[in-house]
Amino acid sequence: MKVLVLAENAQTQRELAAGARTLGDEVIVAKIGGAPETGIADTAYAIELPEGQIPEMAADTVAALVDEVKPDMVIVEPTARLKVIGAAVAAKNDTALVNDVTAFGEGGEAESLYFGGLATIKRQPASAIKFYSCDGAAFANAEASGTDTVVDYAFVAPAHPVRLRERRELTHEGADLGRAAVVVGVGRGFGKEEDLELARELARAVHGEIACSRPLAENEQWLPKSSYLGVSGRMIAPKVYFAVGISGQMQHMIGVHNADTIIAINKDKNAPVFNQADYGLVADLHEALPALAAKLA
């Protein structure tokens, strides 16, 4: 079986290529607008992205590459733009993109969260080419292998292009949450933005990163949108997740349900988060966080 991997980030290219090697006997990696990683696939494609074009406009180019190499499976990194491209290319092949796969079964079935994360579902598209989005967590302990062969692939102008009018740099805070071993999540229990420094002190003490529930990113705008966890945000699997001042509603907790250990800190002893935590501390965060930071530093 031939597997095509489309990924933006170097580490994710390597992880998905390693996973693809467990699923097929030929692995192809493609990257839009830049050099792909080498030594991880049988062939790597550098897809041209002309100046002034946005990556989403490369969907027709990816579709042409799929037509040319004829993979049995396409796996895309679950970034916002690659999900758009993956869905567009899948539609051109009369199928759909199965998103956020968490595991692949021996029979080729893809397992993903379903019904807002309350259940899992196993699916296998009936189409000739199967399209999935997933991250490296679906392929634990897989090893990448391959050659240094890189092929330049020319850009195919889209029939209905989008005109780039302006670029704005997004502010990113901290490292990639998907790779953090320890994450400190903050919620509505933080009454003032300056109180977030208490969580940052704890994060520094445990060499972790800061994340949040949706209201703090979208309503209060205290943290970037890339920091919020949940059904419509990031889904992560750290070794330790501190849920501080977070009530524990399903739409948030599904984003961290794969954490090895969840530690909840909330002054409300009846907060739902305690039902899902491995350890719980009923306390005021203003008192608990400095004490924890001091002990764990």
Image: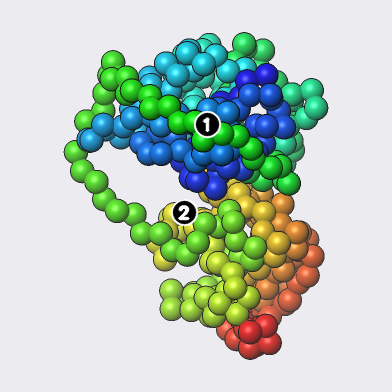
Q: Residue at x 60, y 34 (%)?
A: 146
Contact between marks 1 and 2 (CB within 8 A): the answer is no
Q: Residue at x 46, y 54 (%)?
A: 226
| Local SS, label 1 | strand
Residue 82 in percent (x, y) is at 46, 34
Q: Is residue 46 visible?
A: yes
In terms of depth relative to the viewer, which is nearer, 129 or 261?
129
In terms of depth relative to the viewer, which is nearer, 154 or 140?
154
Residue found at the far left of this picture:
165
User: Is residue 19 rendered to the left or right of residue 221?
Assistant: right
Q: Residue at x 70, y 65 (%)?
A: 240
The residue carrying mark 2 is: 226
Image quarter hosting the N terminus: top right
Q: Quadrant of residue 185?
A: bottom right
Q: Residues within 10 Å of mark 2 (few under 14, many from 20)?
A: some
Residue 68 in percent (x, y) is at 47, 13
Q: Residue at x 46, y 38 (%)?
A: 36
Q: Nearer the viewer, mark 1 or mark 2?
A: 1
User: Is residue 167 rendered to the left or right of residue 23?
Assistant: left
In terms of depth relative to the viewer, which is nearer, 264 or 202?
202
Q: Amino acid at mark 1?
A: Val
In terms of depth relative to the viewer, which is nearer, 116 or 102?
102
| Local SS, label 2 | helix
Q: Is residue 56 visible?
A: no
Picture mark count = 2
Residue 21 in percent (x, y) is at 68, 32
Q: Is residue 80 above or below residue 62?
A: below
Give me the C-alpha separation between circle 1 and circle 2.
Answer: 26 Å
Q: Earlier in the sequence, mark 1 or mark 2?
A: 1
Please give the label number shown on residue 255: none
The residue carrying mark 1 is: 29
